[in-house]
Amino acid sequence: GAVVSQHPSRVICKSGTSVKIECRSLDFQATTMFWYRQFPKQSLMLMATSNEGSKATYEQGVEKDKFLINHASLTLSTLTVTSAHPEDSSFYICSARDGATPDTQYFGPGTRLTVL
Amino acid sequence: SQKIEQNSEALNIQEGKTATLTCNYTNYSPAYLQWYRQDPGRGPVFLLLIRENEKEKRKERLKVTFDTTLKQSLFHITASQPADSATYLCALDPRGGKLIFGQGTELSVKP
C-alpha cells in the first residue's frame, strides 16, 4: 500500500525557534498533501492543503506566516513552524493523496512537537 | 452548523463480541465517508471508504453501513480481538476534496 513518512518523529525546541517537518510519499506521487494538527484527546484539524508547485491553501484561523508550507516536488512537502511558542506544541500529521485513488488519503506517522 | 459526531465515551467489550461504533453528521451531504484506525502517538490508518450510493461495505471482519437519510454510518468489528483496541475515526468529504474528522471513539477489547 501507499506509504507516507514524516521526519522527525519527535522534536523538542526552545520558544522562538523555527522547526521544519518533512512529509514524503515513498512509493507514489502525491499531487496534493494535507497538514493536520491534533491536540490530546481531540480530532484531527486540517491546517492547510498543499498542491505541488503552487501556494498552499490555509484553513480559517491558521496563520500562513507562522506555518510555512512548501510542496516543491510530487513526493515532498514541508511544514515550518516559525517562531514556535509553547501553544504550538501538538501532534502534526501529514497526509497525501494518490492520483490513482483520489478519494483516499494516506497518513504519515505524525510528528510530536514540544516547545519549551 | 455543520457537525460530525462519534460516541465520545470509550467502548469496552469482551473479546469475540461485535463492536459497533456510530458516526452521525449534520448539515453535510458527503460524497463518501471513511473510517480510520489511530493508535496512540501514531497517524491514522485508512480502513474503509463507503460512497453515498452504497449501503454497506465489508472487508474481512469489518463492516460499514451508510444511511444518507439518517445521516449516519455504523462501523462494526466482528469477532473482536484485543489487537483491535484503538481509537476509530470517521471522516467525510464535504465535496471539497478535504476530510472532516469526528473526534473518534476509543475501543478497548478485553481478553
Image (cartoon, rainbow, N blue to C red):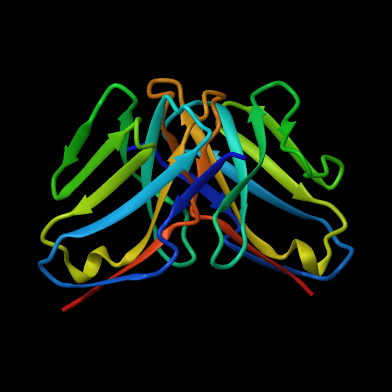
Vertical side of A7 occupied by A16: above or below? below
Q: Quadrant of the C terminus of chain A?
A: bottom right
Q: Residue at x 30, y 32 (%)?
A: B50
Question: Total label count?
Answer: 0
B42, B63: nearer the viewer: B63
Name the image quarter holding the N terminus of chain A.
Answer: top left
Vertical comparison of A16 with B53: above or below: below
Q: What x and y, as percent, mark residue A75?
A: 55, 32
- Quadrant of residue A65 within the rendered picture: top right
Give the residue drawn at x 42%, y 24%.
Answer: B31
Residue B55: image quadrant is top left
Instruction: Indicate the position of residue B62 as horizontal and vertical percent values.
Output: 19, 48
- Kindly give the residue lying farthest to the front in the view shown: B70
Q: Is residue A55 left or right of residue A66?
A: left
Residue A81 pos. (x, y %)? 78, 52
Q: Residue at x 34, y 25 (%)?
A: B52
Q: Is residue B16 left or right of residue B92?
A: left
User: x%, y% of residue A15?
Assistant: 86, 68
Residue at image location 13% in from the left, 56% down from the top: B78
Q: Quadrant of residue B96?
A: top right
Q: Nearer the viewer, residue B22 or A108?
A: B22
Q: Is residue A51 above or below residue B45?
A: above
